[in-house]
Amino acid sequence: MYLMTPEDFEPWVGRNVRISAEPEPVEVVLTGIQRLKVYKESYRQPFVLIFESDERIFLLDESYEFECGRGGPYTILISQLQPKAGRRFYQAVFN
């Protein structure tokens, strides 16, 4: 099984990402990658992807098919962060 890395997503930062959602696909922007502390027994660099969308796009905290990253599409679990002024934010954590 291939473990995704932050480098797989770097070319997508600032770009629209298509998500297979119901009733129709939506697009969000990959706004950033946050690298986390590497622990001694880690298999890869832990990281967080941050996505942003218009407030009209509401995604549940669940797994979706994302058309981004090297070798995608990928099934990625996201959770919603606190919305701000007409924008929604989501994160995907890879430990």
Image (spheres, rainbow, N blue to C red):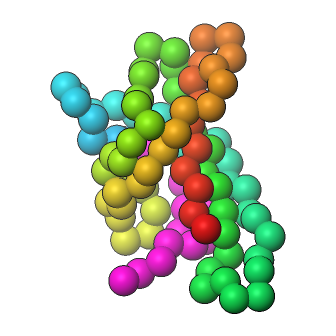
Point out the residue furthest to the left here: 23
Left or right: residue 18 versus residue 81 is left
Res 94 → quadrant: bottom right
Q: Is residue 21 magenta?
A: no
Q: Is residue 29 visible?
A: no
Q: Decide: is 72 above or below 1.
A: above
Task: Pick the residue in front: 68 or 89.
Answer: 89
Task: Pick the residue in front: 34 or 68.
Answer: 34
Q: Decide: is 49 above or below 22.
A: below
**Residue displayed at 55% across by 33% down:** 80
Point out the residue furthest to the front here: 41
**How many numbered circles does the render carry?**
0
**Residue displayed at 34% across by 46% down:** 64
The spot of residue 49 in percent (x, y) is 60, 52
**Residue displayed at 48% across by 77% down:** 3
The residue range painted magenta reads 1-17
Task: Pick the residue in front: 69 or 84.
Answer: 84
Left or right: residue 27 versus residue 48 is left
Left or right: residue 48 versus residue 19 is right
The spot of residue 73 in percent (x, y) is 32, 60
Quarter of the figure that contains the N terminus: bottom left
Q: Is residue 86 visible?
A: yes
Q: Is residue 10 magenta?
A: yes
